[in-house]
Image: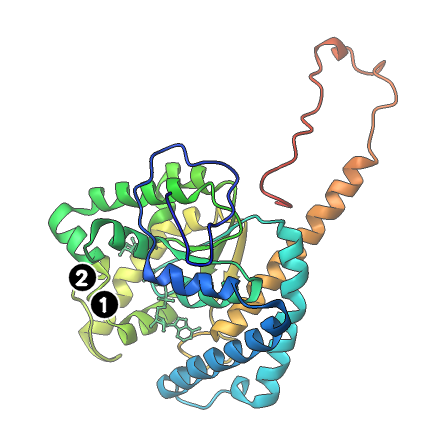
Amino acid sequence: MLLSAPGGPLSRTRQPAQSCTLLVCPENSAAHRTVQLRRSHGQRRQRGALHRQHRLLCRAQEAQSATSPAETTVDAVDELMDRVQELAGPVKEGLEGTSVYLVGMMGSGKTSTGKLLARMLGYPFLDSDVLIENLSKKSIANIFEEDGERYFRDLETSVLRELMPWKSCIVATGGGAVVSRDNWELMQHAVVVWLHGNAATLTHRTIADGTASRPLLGSSAHGGETGGDYDATHQRINKLLTERATMYAQADLCVPIDSNEPNRIAGASAAEVVYRVLKGLDVKLKHAKMDREQKKNFYIESVSGFPNANFLEPPDTTPSAKKGF
Ligand SMILES: Nc1ncnc2c1ncn2[C@@H]1O[C@H](COP(=O)(O)OP(=O)(O)OP(=O)(O)O)[C@@H](O)[C@H]1O
Ligand SMILES: O=C(O)C1=C[C@@H](O)[C@@H](O)[C@H](O)C1
């Protein structure tokens, strides 16, 4: 089996075409436990967990920001949680098992946001970078150093190919996954969400996190926000973002990760970004449903107005695997 989980196998549309090569990652097993939450306890526990993660992230942000953001008040967090929970049910229903793939630059929060989103939807979370590291038994930095970027990109495509048949997952892709046309073909059965942040937010986060594990940022920064380290990283991120923007823009949904509050340099909290993702998906799914309803009411009364009627192909009624998009 390609991917197994302690909570049982993931549902999938069909058997993977290739023989199995990936081993499940520890990250994955932790994420799969979220699926096992009992329904009776699910909502309360989801809310509690989200609260805790949100507070931790807010505290981290406060430490990094100049002022204490209003978003951290208990009332504001409660209200946000309510809105997130209200949206999670309908979005899950609307997705009908379609997986959600997160794309975006390094530091955009694909992992942090993805884990929360997975928790809220009751989907398992998978991280393609982690799967690559498990598969090759090397860190990404070592793969780049010893085998080169080309080799890494091929591994990335193999991992995405293996993930493709699996339904009802949240997948964090690598920051550069969007540069490959093959990867886009593999992701077409999922809903692809771009977590889009400005270069300053991304630089702030990657520097705070450390750039050593991110080979494309080189050893340009391990410290604070002043001096050459910040500038070099910002420049590198800005260049990559500019080169890749049109590719990220092919996503089904673009969600900003920056904060509405000017002093919040680390960007919006993960809970706020999850809310934005769910809201965006909800709107898209509703529109798509309305479109489908309208199409049902459309039929051609007569072919007399169509001189080439004999050559008309019957409409394709195969339901789209990618629900609603
Ligand atoms: N909403 C947020 N607020 C503050 N910090 C955040 C937020 N989301 C993520 N971070 C921080 O930014 C860093 C990068 O986040 P994360 O690993 O989730 O991003 P990523 O898109 O998966 O990055 P990469 O592609 O480089 O692995 C981490 O240190 C994380 O704690
Ligand atoms: O932006 C990129 O190209 C990368 C992002 C990371 O997630 C890793 O996939 C790797 O460091 C390359």
Where is residue 79? Give x, y as percent: 64, 81
Where is residue 293? Give x, y as percent: 78, 42
Q: Is residue 224 left or right of residue 255?
A: left
Q: Identify the secondary structure beneath mark 2.
A: loop
Give the residue at mark 1. Answer: 211
For the residue pair 64 and 226, the one nearer the viewer reads as: 64
Residue type marked 1: Thr
Give the residue at mark 2. Answer: 218
| Placement of the N terminus among the 4 image quadrants | top left
Q: Residues within 10 Å of mark 1 (few under 14, many from 20)?
A: many
Where is residue 192? Give x, y as percent: 50, 50
Tell me the residue at 38%/41% (across/down).
Answer: 162
For the residue pair 195 and 167, the one nearer the viewer reads as: 167
* Label drawn at residue 322: none
Tell me the residue at 35%/41% (across/down).
Answer: 180
Regarding residue 109, the answer to whether it shows in the image is no
Tell me the residue at 71%/15% (across/down).
Answer: 312
